[in-house]
Image (tube, rainbow, N blue to C red):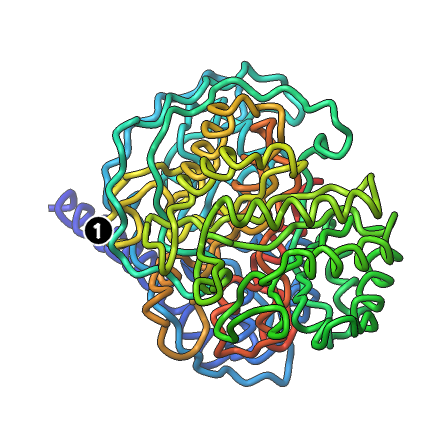
Amino acid sequence: MQRVYRSLIAIGLLAIMVSVLILAPRLASAQDGGQQPTQHVVQRGESLYGIARQYGVTVLAIAQANNISNPNLIYVGQVLKIPVGTTPTVTPTTPVPTTPAATTPAPTTPPPPTGQTVHVVQAGENLYRIALQYGTTVQAISQANGITNPNLVYVGMQLKIPAPGAVLPAATTPAAVATTPAPVATTPAPATTSEASGGEATAVATTPAPTNTAPAAAVPFNYGIQVQLFGQDSAAVVENLTRLGVGWVKQEISWAMFEPTKGNINFDDIDTAIDALDGAGFNIMLTVYDAPDWARGATEENGPPTDNQDFANFVTQLATRYAGRVDAYEIWKEPNLRREWNGKAYGKPISAAGYVDLLRVGYTAVKAADSEAVVVSGGLAPTGLDNADNALNDRNFLRQMYQAGVNTVADAIGIHPFGFGNPPDSTCCETNPQITGWDDHPSFFFQNTLQEYRAIMGEFNDSGRFLWVTEFGWGSSENLPGDVNPNFGFVEFTSLDEQSQYTIRAFETGNELGFIGPMFLWNLNFCEVFGIGSAECYWSLLDPAGNPKPIFFAVEGIEK
């Protein structure tokens, strides 16, 4: 009988212990929401940015109150002190769909050898955060564990952590992309930054390109970002750029804005921008586009000039005035789209040969005024559409640019490898049912666009020239109010944390490939400039009030 009583007592104690373990998280959550509003227990999927918005405070205030040196690194269960005097507010959030990694059974990882540093993946972690924790890189951990897609790690996975600075075996050369021609994309293209993607899949060049011996064409990989300085506090913008640690800054120059009447150029705002950036030691690229009405035969959208010499005259004035201070000029942007090249009504239809004609006069004007400045061809919009009235397939357009002689009038080739909702290591077509319409064509993928452009350059024996990523990035609608524009439906599939992770990995990829020059992330402050209702907010590193979003801290934390 005593044995029976002892067994019952043991069972009772065990039940009490299990109850405590089950209820503990709930009690902590209740305590956070009720009795102690100045504390917050971090839940899975939360970021410091989202928590700051919830309580109506800034990321910096919470970081300082909790001695957090890297605001991008918080963990599930962490108890945060919220600065006194704040009241929680309810902020609408966009649900983030479950990623394929969460529903696909993960392979079993064999236990590492005894004595080796091991990390067991916890809920909410990713390789980027784990690499920062151990002072190593995503690439090093991936190689040490045979991980082919750094975006797919799972809870409980045991990772071998290489020592910082350890020499690892060379990565295996990636396999060639399938050579089957891709179908034409049928999804309507977005109305900004990048279009519905497309092009033909071609074999990937697997050998790093030799360095071009021309000084202007051999500018190596570097970190860059696009900004809007006109009408902004230059000192504040420069302060943020300095925090990010980027080497290059891109500013667009609308020809129409600065020469509203022929021969009457107002340089005041450009002078202010160049003074601020050059004075802070940044390399500067100006993207020159958008002919004024007086130089065109139409006023709808943007378009090329009727007479290319008018453009040459404007570029000559720019390059002469800023010789030795502006380091690169991108001639036009996305000329394979109607919204940037609407000239059919006056004899300038969308055409690769027509664009190269404009590039040629721009190149000549820049080199005559400043021979050391780099001239980059306008980054094309990734699109699978092939409709002469609206958009031309960017892969075909690039081939036609080479046929028109682009390699003789550009030091580097511009590219806009946007990833839409797809991770930077993904390739077409890794169909995800939650991203239907945005993952069924090669140009929806960052990796495909880079490799297919490189293959086209190889077709024309131009492997010595660098690709400059003049725009790239991933948008996220998380924590932004209002309905998502259906043209940008893919931004709902990327959380703020994924936006940070994808961006870091994209920079790593550019640095690893050997044929990528500067990479310009799109964008720093457009949400602050154009307002919270603008599509640019999905990509901005700063929110409408100028506060850093998680992606800002992620880029700031890169060891450059």
Could you tell me if residue 367 is visible in this image?
yes
Q: Position of residue 352 (x, y in %)?
A: 48, 45
Instruction: Identify which residue is drawn at 84% across, 63% down.
Output: 276
The residue identified by callout 1 is: 433
Instruction: Identify which residue is drawn at 87% across, 62% down.
Output: 275
Instruction: Identify which residue is drawn at 40% across, 28% down.
Output: 148
Which residue sits furthest left? 1
Q: Position of residue 454 (x, y in %)?
A: 50, 30
- Give left or right: position of 542 versus 233: left
Is 331 placed above or below 292 here? above
Instruction: Identify which residue is drawn at 33% across, 66% down.
Output: 95
Q: Nearer the viewer, residue 487 or 133?
A: 487
Q: Position of residue 179 (x, y in %)?
A: 30, 26
* Pointer 1 local density, CA inside 10 Å: few below 14, some 14–19, many at least 20: few
Image-quadrant location for residue 228: bottom right
Image-quadrant location for residue 17: bottom left
Is 485 placed above or below 46 here? below
How many marks the image carries: the answer is: 1
Could you tell me if residue 42 is visible in this image?
no
Q: Position of residue 292 (x, y in %)?
A: 63, 71
Residue kind at label 1, given as amino acid type = Pro
Q: Nearer the viewer, residue 226 or 98?
A: 226
Q: Nearer the viewer, residue 338 or 186?
A: 338
Mark 1 lies on a secondary structure that is helix
